[in-house]
Image (tube, rainbow, N blue to C red):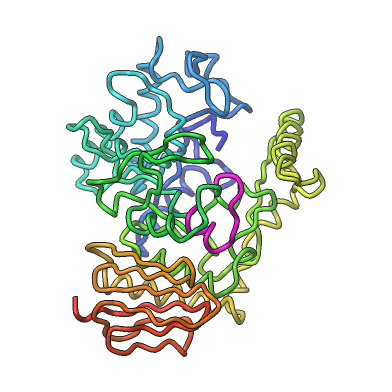
């Protein structure tokens, strides 16, 4: 995320030819390739661009320092630099989509925002090549402007992040309500997230201390990307714990059921599907000693306010931090890991056959801790309480997937034991 030579695939990953072979191999297997690109800042180490032209500006500031110059003197060439980079990945390397990192940190006061200009250029490339190319924005602003058509004043991107879907689910299933989870926890915000992706849509945020977000009304479900965990939500924890370390198997299954039956675009984090036991810790490999030391010290200082002692926070520069974060692929076939993997496979197969669509009706009982989501012809019933519950669900047909064999479907009611999840068909719809 500290890129400086944006046109150069790193030699350690095979260089340009290696990357082309990887993309071609994915395409032969029916896989699209989404490349993560960072246009909101440039890295501090090996960054010589400012020596040649005003690539950075102190007119705006970001979390990383001076902003990329998208709207000041000399910005036309800087904008062209970024757009040409995106077109290279899509045109020369045949990537199918770009995930644009933290677009809320891209500051542009120009008449035409850089993201709108980028979307227009990518649209032209797609038309010339008869390919379906996509731009997906990571943003925590809860603003539909990113996906609204350019003709309506939007930027014309294809999809945008919905991190609050994750926050609401995580806080409910783990009980964590500190930091940016402060606005979540009860079933009410989770129900709102399950209905529309964003929770704050012009509502008060205690964490931010103000009104946050805009309504997603008019947006299509496929314009929102949701996840139960991802590299940010895991890597930003002091010890990089995955959901596996924070939830039991039943709650992992409940999270997966809500993710893969949602009408939104689901993102599955590497290893999530089998409940990987390895953490995903923040690691770096800066060759500049002073920079590496500053990162290590800063990381420990960042978590001191959470009560973490310095020795409890893994050193990003320590090679062991990286080694601990590598997946252990062999554990996929072991006991509970294989059971969870099969659950994910069954849910994905179900999603292929029954596309979640239509209205989203969410009902819940805060006291007894059950929740039911009706999406099109599917209903997902989750019992987070300590006692069995009988939940009325429209006109039910049969249970398609259950995490507990004791789940029973009779007439228009589903009986769910404690900590269990059921996905049922709704034949009357």
Tell me where residue 94 appears, x and y as whole percent.
34, 47
Q: Residue at x 54, y 29 (%)?
A: 4
Say if 406 sits above or below 360 in the image: below
Magenta stretch: residue 173 in it?
yes
Rendering coords of residue 98 (x, y %) = 38, 43
Which of the 4 quarters of the picture holds residue 301? top right
Residue most extreme to the top: 73
Is 394 positioned to the left or the right of 402 in the image? left
Q: Is residue 117 visible?
A: yes
Residue at image position (64%, 64%) is: 245
Which image quadrant for residue 113?
top left
Q: Nearer the viewer, residue 69 or 288?
A: 69
In the depicted view, which residue is nearer to us: 335 or 88? 335
Identify the residue at the far right of this view: 311
Magenta region, mostly helix, strand or loop? helix
Split into 4 quadrants, where in the image is the C terminus? bottom left
Residue 240 image point, x, y percent:
65, 53
Res. 232 visible in picture:
no
Depth order, front residue of 306/73: 306
Residue 51 included in the magenta stretch of the image: no
Count of numbered labels shown in the rendering: 0
Is residue 70 positioned above or below 191 on the image? Answer: above
Looking at the rendered image, the quarter that the N terminus falls into is top right
What residue is at 54 percent from the left and 20 percent from the top?
66
Start and end of the magenta stretch? Answer: 167-180
Q: Residue at 42% x, 42% y: name it.
A: 138
* Vertical position of residue 172 compared to residue 382: above or below: above
Q: Picture coordinates of residue 336 (x, y %)? A: 59, 79
């Amino acid at each position: 995320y500290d890129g400086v030579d944006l046109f150069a695939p790193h030699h350690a990953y095979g260089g340009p030819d290696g990357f082309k072979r990887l993309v071609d191999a994915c395409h032969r297997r029916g896989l699209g390739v989404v490349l993560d690109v960072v246009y909101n800042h440039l890295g501090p180490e090996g960054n010589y661009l400012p020596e040649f032209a005003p690539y950075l500006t102190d007119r705006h500031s970001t979390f990383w320092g001076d902003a990329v110059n998208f709207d000041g003197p000399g910005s036309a060439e800087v904008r062209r630099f970024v757009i040409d980079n995106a077109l290279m990945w899509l045109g020369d390397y045949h990537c199918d989509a770009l995930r644009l990192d933290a677009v809320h940190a891209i500051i542009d006061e120009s008449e035409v925002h850089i993201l709108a200009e980028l979307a227009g250029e990518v649209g032209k490339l797609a038309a010339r090549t008869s390919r379906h190319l996509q731009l997906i924005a990571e943003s925590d602003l809860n603003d539909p402007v990113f996906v609204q058509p350019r003709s309506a004043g939007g930027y014309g991107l294809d999809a945008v992040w919905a991190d609050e879907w994750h926050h609401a689910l995580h806080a409910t299933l783990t009980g964590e309500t500190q930091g940016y989870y402060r606005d979540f926890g009860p079933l009410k915000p989770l129900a709102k997230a399950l209905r529309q992706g964003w929770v704050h849509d012009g509502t008060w945020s205690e964490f931010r201390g103000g009104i946050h977000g805009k309504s997603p009304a008019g947006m299509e479900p496929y314009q929102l990307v949701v996840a139960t965990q991802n590299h940010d939500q895991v890597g930003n924890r002091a010890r990089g714990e995955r959901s596996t370390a924070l939830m039991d198997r039943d709650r992992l299954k409940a999270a997966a059921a809500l993710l893969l039956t949602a009408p939104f675009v689901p993102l599955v984090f590497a290893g999530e599907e089998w409940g990987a036991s390895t953490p995903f810790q923040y690691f770096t490999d800066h060759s500049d000693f002073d920079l590496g030391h500053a990162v290590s010290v800063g990381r420990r200082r960042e978590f001191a306010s959470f009560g973490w002692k310095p020795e409890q926070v893994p050193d990003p520069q320590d090679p062991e931090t990286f080694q601990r974060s590598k997946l252990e692929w062999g554990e996929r076939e072991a006991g509970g890991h294989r059971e969870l993997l099969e659950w994910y496979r069954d849910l994905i197969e179900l999603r292929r056959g029954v596309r979640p669509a239509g209205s989203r009706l969410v009902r819940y009982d805060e006291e007894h801790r059950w929740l039911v989501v009706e999406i099109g012809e599917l209903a997902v019933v989750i019992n987070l309480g300590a006692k069995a519950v009988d939940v009325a669900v429209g006109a039910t047909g049969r249970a398609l997937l259950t995490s507990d064999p004791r789940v029973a479907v009779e007439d228009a009611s589903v009986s769910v034991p404690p900590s269990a999840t059921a996905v049922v068909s709704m034949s009357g719809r």
